[in-house]
């Protein structure tokens, strides 16, 4: 059956809602996949909105996706520029956001905290907007998250004897994951009466190292070969002692591997050709195949599922490129 605009509109209204695409409070959900979903669906829905006759609900969805693209970039502290990320001028992108927050009061409040702070005590760390509770938290002490007047993420633990009062931890955090890891460590100490496990300490240090890669997620680094970044991130991952650090750097490494294989595809050369140009370190067939395997993992777990078929086909067309004499 031939697909119509109407069926595509209906599909997106069900499957491209931000609450379906993003899980803000679960740091174990790969942020690369969530960003890819928001970016790709925003582009698809925006294209559908260019029709002569368009459903008002579809326009509202486009505007909501624009807002959540900006929110997600702030949540994970990614440098964001509408022309580069959304493919449109900043003024047009912001018009979509303003149309959304005019309809949704809670999002208007969050947007105000992130921008002009008309409703906040500007730069006041003691004025905190509540964002939500930790859905993965176990035990009898809920974790509350917020954003303060300095635009720093905060957390508070609800004590059993003061269930209606939140005493915010003094420390502010630059991104949500940092606040979440600190909150989980404190929560474990409160629930068990013991010092937090060393793994929480390691996870916080490792996330601090990973954060710089998240910040530059939307930027194309042309100052050095991709293989140099791959080797750097691989080294970072091997240093990780926490499960979360290994998970986080593993996703970053998969993304860099995908960029490397995509470079080979765009230049119509093998992975080996890209590697030979980029590093003087010894590289054999196993390295090239490992990079391609990690690129496939990125496509499987780090991108919008709607993109997977095309990206898998692209990966199929890129070869490692070593002869048998180069294997050892």
Image (cartoon, rainbow, N blue to C red):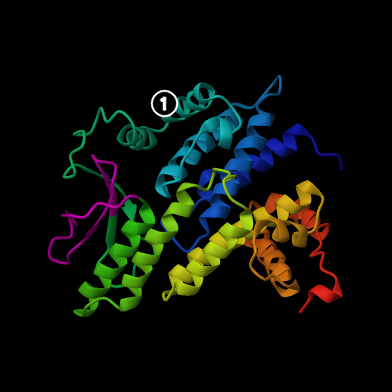
Q: Which picture quadrant has residue 203?
A: bottom left
Query: Which residue is found at the position 59% from the left and 48% from the top?
Result: 36
Residue positioned most to the front: 280
Toward the top, the furthest residue is: 52
> Is 297 displayed left or right of 32 in the figure?
right
| 37 left or right of 178 in image | right
User: The N terminus appears in which quarter of the rendering?
Assistant: top right
The local crowd at label 1, few if under 14, some if 14 to 19, many if 20 or more residues have their Cα within 10 Å, is: few
- Label the magenta part by its dominant secondary structure: loop
- In the structure shown, which secondary structural element does the residue marked by tag 1 occupy? loop
- Tell me: 155 left or right of 104: left
Q: Answer left or right for 109 relative to 262.
A: left
- Mark 1 lies on residue: 102
In the image, what residue occupies the spot 50% across and 74% down?
238
Magenta span of residues: 145-174
Tell me the quarter of the image containing the C terminus: bottom right
Q: Position of residue 269 (x, y in %)?
A: 81, 54
Residue 323, image x, y percentages: 85, 70
Relative to 264, residue 52 above or below? above
Residue drawn at the location 30% of the way across and 78% of the way down:
197
Q: Nearer the viewer, residue 54 or 232?
A: 232
Residue 196, magenta (yes or no)? no
Q: Position of residue 167 (x, y in %)?
A: 16, 56
Q: How many marks?
A: 1
């Amino acid at each position: 059956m031939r697909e119509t605009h109407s069926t595509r509109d209906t599909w997106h209204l069900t499957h491209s809602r931000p609450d379906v695409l993003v899980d803000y409070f679960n740091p174990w959900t790969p942020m690369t996949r969530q960003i890819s979903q928001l970016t790709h669906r925003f582009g698809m829905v925006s294209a559908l909105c260019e029709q002569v006759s368009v459903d008002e609900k579809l326009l509202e969805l486009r505007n909501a996706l624009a807002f959540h693209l900006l929110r997600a970039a702030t949540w994970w502290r990614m440098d964001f520029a509408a022309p580069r990320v959304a493919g449109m001028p900043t003024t047009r992108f912001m018009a979509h956001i303003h149309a959304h927050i005019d309809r949704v009061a809670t999002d208007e409040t969050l947007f105000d905290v992130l921008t002009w702070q008309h409703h906040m005590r500007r730069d006041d760390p003691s004025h905190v907007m509540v964002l939500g509770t930790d859905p993965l938290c176990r035990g009898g002490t809920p974790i509350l998250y917020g954003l303060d007047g300095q635009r720093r993420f905060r957390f508070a633990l609800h004590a059993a004897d003061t269930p209606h009062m939140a005493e915010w931890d003094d420390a502010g955090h630059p991104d949500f994951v940092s606040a979440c890891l600190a909150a989980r460590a404190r929560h474990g100490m409160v629930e068990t009466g013991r010092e937090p496990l060393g793994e929480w300490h390691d996870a916080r240090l490792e996330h601090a190292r990973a954060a710089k890669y998240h910040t530059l997620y939307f930027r194309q680094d042309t100052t050095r070969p991709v293989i140099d970044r791959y080797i750097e991130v691989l080294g970072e991952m091997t240093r990780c002692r926490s499960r979360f650090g290994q998970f986080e750097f593993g996703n970053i490494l998969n993304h860099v591997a995908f960029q490397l294989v995509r470079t080979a595809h765009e230049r119509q050369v093998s992975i080996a050709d890209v590697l030979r140009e980029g590093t003087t370190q010894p590289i054999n067939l196993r390295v090239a195949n490992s990079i391609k395997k990690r690129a496939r993992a990125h496509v499987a777990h780090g991108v919008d599922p709607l993109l997977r078929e095309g990206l898998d086909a692209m990966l199929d067309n890129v070869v490692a490129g070593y002869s048998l004499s180069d294997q050892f």
